[in-house]
């Protein structure tokens, strides 16, 4: 047997003989045994749980109305099926304005009562639910119900769908399956408010990577370092060392064999735990994630990084305690630098990314991921804020939507809240009124005008196109960064539960859960006057909303919806929980032209675009779907590397679609042949948004916050708008980032684990937002691996040199 | 380099440097020349700090010499070939806590490139030889110091080396154990092996070593058989005589006044007389004179200087010179 193999095997036996190993294995076994009885309990069910009730107070109010014989016939039909005692309570609670003095009805009680309705055999009647028979999903159920051959399960499904029809805004869409957390077959608490797919997509990687990062990545590696730290100092202690050195073996190989022998110890532990976790996750949660097993070498790599430091300390100082202290100091240093880098990275590299470009009134305007609306300031070469912002963090800004006739822009910013949804202090839109300067309409190409004054290559001031029309003219760059270009006016309030604000031809449409609301621009002035009042008195006629619902009757959207105007601007394509609707104007209102149903569970974040021939649907983690104008599936294709789509836009005067991915790559999709070609190859991986200016020219947002004008005919960048960096940005780019690059990054291997667990090349900034358009951080898989590998090689190399030169 | 020599050390010097900035230099060896013949048992003596351990480390390649050169069995000291042909028992040997005697022998045998079957065969024999048979499956951490020492000796002999370097082999052993080790060393000599012994126990060295070197202050003070060393350091004192005498006290006092001597009273009116002589003629003359004085010679004993005396003499005389 080779001598070094003998040392390696001996180290293994040494580890096996270590009592701490057995204590650890026993501990891990107990943890795994404790975890093993956890699991999902899944039931096909159309019953409601408290989490299915989206708006409790509204539901109570509507049910009380129905019980009193008011409101919608469907609501009345449901109320009639409720328990009489409960109806009395409903009425009492609804009568007392805030429910004080009465025991409020909680969501669980409501769910319980509605579940009784779900089991009633005679809920459906054509009079009570007139629109039900038109729903393709309900037709077969109604048919069997009428023949009295309906099964209990079908009855529950039908009644649950009827309840949804009666309370579209108060109840969440039925999933058909309920999931509970269970322990040894017993259900724990209420059903989970998420679908199996969402658990798989969002929570599984978060849960698994948390267990691995915290449980194994930090705790286990630290324990492993403590346990293995004496191996090197003990070996290189004089009593046993002189005997080893007298043998015909190389010192370097002796050290390396002892080093990797120590690693075997950790490998045994990690393999045991991860294989245990793999089987528990698979058998109990149906999560057969092979990534867990790939985490074994990654965790080993993390350990090797720390152990190389421990080994060197053991060689130099020959003391196990010093080894542990050296590792802790090293960890603290890496953690501090990594923390600084990770805290600054979103602020400097992600949130400033341009997500929308508009050229309005000869001004180049952008919206970034912070939701900041910026105007290019050619004097200071910065994106000057257009308005005072009242949101911080990752936000979503609608617009600016420009009305050339009225010379105004409409915009509004919202926070992105965890697990989806938008939030702001008020829902009132902001209005920017532009001065009536002759000849500044959008008739001319903005690019032509901008090119004269604003490109970075030239520093001359803009001639006659000063963006600042307010009285606030900044004197310095720092002042310009803080001074908004315009003082916006406050407009009418957007409807609740907003998804998007889109331009549909000449109209502005707010896409909300409760319908599609058109903004009446004529009422903007009235609304403003109403807000100001007259002599301190509110004008009664101004309370009329500026938004009018033009959606078809009983048209509601689910909590996961997306809408986009068609290429011609004559209609709207709406995605809502797995369903697609093509709506077009029928007079002043919109009507559904075509509908379609997609596969999947409908909870996927989705983007959708449509022209006269094709409809393209991009969903999180699923292939692109191309449908025809009647929303019938034509073909599917996956983007290279299964990248997720961030933005889609039709190429002007063309049936092609431009697609931008979260990894910054842009493609041109020929929908007819379902073929992709790279767009602007020289900027692949750098693009953050696309804005077409004709079929041969486009504006591109380029990382981190630059804008390029690209001529597709010559395939060249014609203009660049590169803002001057702030001091913090300079510190990050020239200090923190290079230091981080060359520094070992054991913690950054977490991203590698995230990658193998999720398969995603990008990672959401915050908690799950279910929004494809929100910028994500690209997972840098290779830099940490390379820098850590170099670090380990250098430390081991130095250790080997040291051990070969050292005189013991 | 002479192939016939087991150890060939030529003008070997070693200086240690200590300190980070202002390095202090300490010369552990100052030009040592030593030649150990094949097949002999050679003892290295010296006080603490004499440079003995440094010399052994140089021979094993654990430290590099600052000057000069050293060869083991014709190969440069520290080379892999040389290390393959030697067996070493270090001072204060400690074994990993998880080792049993069998596993320790297995590991060190593998490190010495001994085939597995040979390891298996020799392990039993050697454990029997060193008196550890029946205890081979016990963890070494439960062994006494003497048992560990014997196991150390077994591992040193496992690959049948031509040269054994034993550093304090009887350290921690009881008299019976020491005797067994001496017996083992004698057995090795009989097999034609060379043994290089470093020990503080001078009587032991004197008992088993063919030749002895005395190292002090980094220099070699003397090399040779114990007799040669005695001649070298006690050459002027060719005879030392001790006699038990019986006679009149006054007459004995007269004898003491005539020659420098030690005169100690013994029971039953007897006296012990001890003195040193330059030659045999002087001894004869002294006996004639005692008889002339009518003193009876009850017992006469001629004594030689011990190795300890020689060692102390060698170490102190050179220290005085220095």
Image (cartoon, coloured by chain):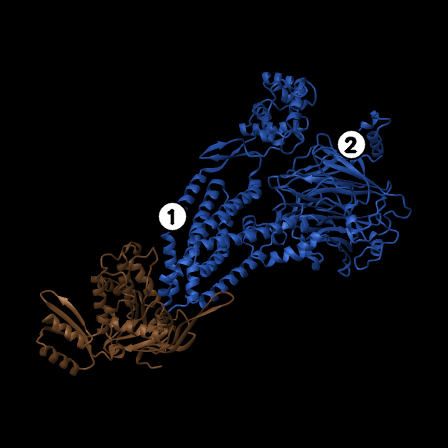
Q: From the viewer's perspective, is B74 left or right of A408?
A: left
Q: Nearer the viewer, residue A733 or B50?
A: B50
Report the chain shown in brown.
B
Check the image and report above or below for A430 versus A709. Answer: above
Q: Is residue B108 visible?
A: yes
**Badge 2 or badge 1: first in the primary sequence:** 1
Where is the N terminus of chain A found, in terms of image quarters?
bottom left
Check the image and report above or below for A489 versus A653. Answer: above
- The x, y position of residue A327, in whole percent, is 50, 54
Q: Mark 1 points at which residue?
A: A22
Query: Mark 1: which secondary structure?
Result: helix
- The x, y position of residue A486, in whole percent, is 82, 43
- The x, y position of residue A446, in whole percent, is 83, 51
Specify few, some or many for label 1: CA neighbours under 10 Å numbering under 14, 14-19, or 20 or more.
some
Most distant residue in the right direction: A438
Q: Which of A166 and B237 is in front in this view?
A: B237
Q: Mark 2 points at which residue?
A: A548
Where is the C terminus of chain A found, in terms of image quarters?
bottom left
Specify few, some or many for label 2: CA neighbours under 10 Å numbering under 14, 14-19, or 20 or more.
some
- Return the chain for callout 2: A
Apparent colour of chain A: blue
- Return the chain for callout 1: A
Most distant residue in the bottom direction: B281
């Amino acid at each position: 047997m080779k001598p070094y193999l003998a040392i390696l095997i001996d180290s293994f036996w040494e580890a096996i003989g270590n009592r701490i190993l057995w204590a650890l294995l026993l501990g891990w076994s107990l943890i795994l045994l404790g975890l093993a009885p956890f699991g999902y309990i899944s039931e096909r069910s159309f019953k409601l749980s408290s989490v299915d009730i989206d708006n409790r107070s509204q539901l109570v109010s509507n049910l009380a109305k129905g019980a009193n014989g008011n409101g919608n016939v469907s609501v009345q039909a449901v109320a009639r099926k409720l328990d009489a005692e409960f109806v009395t309570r409903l009425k009492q609670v609804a009568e007392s304005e805030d429910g004080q003095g009465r025991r409020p009805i909680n969501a669980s009680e409501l769910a319980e009562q509605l579940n009784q309705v779900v089991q009633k055999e005679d809920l459906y009647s054509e009079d009570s639910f007139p629109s039900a028979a038109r729903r393709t999903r309900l037709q077969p159920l109604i048919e069997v119900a009428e023949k009295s051959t309906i099964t209990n399960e079908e009855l529950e499904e039908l009644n649950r769908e009827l309840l949804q029809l009666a309370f579209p805004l108060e109840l969440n869409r039925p999933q058909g399956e309920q999931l509970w957390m269970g322990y040894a077959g017993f259900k724990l608490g209420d059903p989970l408010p998420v679908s199996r797919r969402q658990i798989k997509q969002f929570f599984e990687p978060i849960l698994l990577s948390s267990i691995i990062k915290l449980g194994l990545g930090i705790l286990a590696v630290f324990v492993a370092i403590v346990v293995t730290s004496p191996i090197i100092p003990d070996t290189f202690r004089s009593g046993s060392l002189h005997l080893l050195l007298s043998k015909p073996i190389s010192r370097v190989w002796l050290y390396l064999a002892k080093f990797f022998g120590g690693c075997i110890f950790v490998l045994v532990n990690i393999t045991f735990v991860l294989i245990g976790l793999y089987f528990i996750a698979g058998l109990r949660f149906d999560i057969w994630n092979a990534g867990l097993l790939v985490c074994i070498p990654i965790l080993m790599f993390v350990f090797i990084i720390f152990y190389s430091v421990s080994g060197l300390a053991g060689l130099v100082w020959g003391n196990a305690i010093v080894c542990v202290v050296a590792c802790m100091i090293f960890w603290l240093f890496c953690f501090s630098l990594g923390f600084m880098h990770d805290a600054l990275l979103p602020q400097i590299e992600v949130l400033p990314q341009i997500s929308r470009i508009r050229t309005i009134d000869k001004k180049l305007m952008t919206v970034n991921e912070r939701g900041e609306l910026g105007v290019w300031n050619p004097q200071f070469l910065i994106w000057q804020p257009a308005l005072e912002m009242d949101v911080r963090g990752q936000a979503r800004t609608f617009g600016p939507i420009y009305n050339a006739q009225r010379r105004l822009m409409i915009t509004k910013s919202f926070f992105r809240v965890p697990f989806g949804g938008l939030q702001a202090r008020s829902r009132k839109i902001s209005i920017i009124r532009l001065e009536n300067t002759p000849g500044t309409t959008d008739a001319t190409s903005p690019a032509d005008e901008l090119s004269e004054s604003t490109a970075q290559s030239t520093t001359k001031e803009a001639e006659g196109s000063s963006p600042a029309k307010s009285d606030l003219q900044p004197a310095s760059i720092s002042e310009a960064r803080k001074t908004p270009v315009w003082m916006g006016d406050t407009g009418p309030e957007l409807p609740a539960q907003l998804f998007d604000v889109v331009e549909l031809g000449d109209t502005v449409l707010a896409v909300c859960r409760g319908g599609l609301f058109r903004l009446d621009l004529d009422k903007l002035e009235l609304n403003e006057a109403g807000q100001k009042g007259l002599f301190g008195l509110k004008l009664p006629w101004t309370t009329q909303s500026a938004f009018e619902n033009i959606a078809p009757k009983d048209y509601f959207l689910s909590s996961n919806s997306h809408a986009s105007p068609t290429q011609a601007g004559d209609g709207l394509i709406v995605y809502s929980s797995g369903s697609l609707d093509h709506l077009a104007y029928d007079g002043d209102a919109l009507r559904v032209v075509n509908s379609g149903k997609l596969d999947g569970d409908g909870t996927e974040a989705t983007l959708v675009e449509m022209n006269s021939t094709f409809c393209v649907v991009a969903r999180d983690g699923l292939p692109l779907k191309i449908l025809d104008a009647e929303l019938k599936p034509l073909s599917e294709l996956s983007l290279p590397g299964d990248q997720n789509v961030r933005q889609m836009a039709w190429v002007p005067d063309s049936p092609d679609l431009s697609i931008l991915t979260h990894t910054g790559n842009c493609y041109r999709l020929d929908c007819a042949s379902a073929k992709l070609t790279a767009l602007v190859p020289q900027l692949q991986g750098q693009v953050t948004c696309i804005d077409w200016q004709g079929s041969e020219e486009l504006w591109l947002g380029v990382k981190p916050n630059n804008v390029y004008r690209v001529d597709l005919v010559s395939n060249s960048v014609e203009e660049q708008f590169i803002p001057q960096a702030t001091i913090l940005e300079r510190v990050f780019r020239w200090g923190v980032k290079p230091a981080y690059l060359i520094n070992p990054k054991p913690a950054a291997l977490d991203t590698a684990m995230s990658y193998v667990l999720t398969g995603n090349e990008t990672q959401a900034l915050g908690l799950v937002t279910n929004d494809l358009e929100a910028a994500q951080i690209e997972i840098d898989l290779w830099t940490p691996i390379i820098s850590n590998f170099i670090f380990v090689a250098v430390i081991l190399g130095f250790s080997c040199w040291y051990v070969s030169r050292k005189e013991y | 380099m002479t192939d016939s020599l087991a150890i060939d050390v030529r003008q070997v010097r070693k200086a240690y440097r200590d300190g980070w900035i202002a390095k202090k230099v300490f010369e552990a060896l100052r030009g040592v020349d030593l030649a150990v013949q094949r097949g002999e048992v050679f003892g290295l003596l010296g006080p603490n700090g004499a440079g003995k351990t440094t010399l052994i480390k140089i021979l094993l390649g654990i430290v590099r010499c600052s000057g000069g050169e050293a060869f083991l069995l014709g190969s440069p000291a520290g080379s892999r070939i040389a290390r393959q042909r030697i067996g070493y028992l270090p001072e204060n040997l400690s074994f990993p806590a998880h080792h049993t005697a069998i596993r320790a022998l297995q590991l060190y045998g593998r490190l010495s490139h001994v085939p597995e079957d040979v390891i298996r065969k020799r392990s039993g024999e050697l454990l029997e030889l060193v008196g550890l048979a029946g205890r081979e499956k016990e963890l070494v951490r439960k062994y006494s110091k003497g048992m560990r020492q014997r196991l150390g000796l077994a591992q040193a002999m496992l690959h049948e080396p031509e040269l054994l370097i034993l550093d304090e082999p009887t350290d921690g052993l009881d008299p019976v154990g020491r005797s067994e080790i001496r017996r083992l060393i004698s057995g090795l000599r009989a097999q034609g092996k060379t043994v290089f012994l470093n020990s503080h126990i001078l009587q032991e060295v004197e008992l088993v070593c063919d030749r002895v070197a005395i190292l002090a202050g980094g220099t070699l003070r003397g090399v040779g058989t114990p007799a040669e060393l005695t001649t070298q350091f006690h050459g002027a004192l060719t005879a030392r005589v001790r006699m038990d005498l019986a006679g009149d006290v006054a007459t004995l006092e007269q004898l003491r006044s005539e020659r420098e001597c030690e005169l100690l009273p013994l029971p039953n009116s007897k006296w012990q007389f001890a003195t040193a002589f330059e030659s045999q003629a002087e001894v004869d003359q002294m006996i004639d004179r005692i008889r002339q004085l009518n003193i009876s010679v009850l017992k006469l004993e001629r004594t030689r200087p011990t190795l300890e005396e020689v060692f102390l003499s060698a170490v102190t005389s050179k220290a005085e010179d220095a």
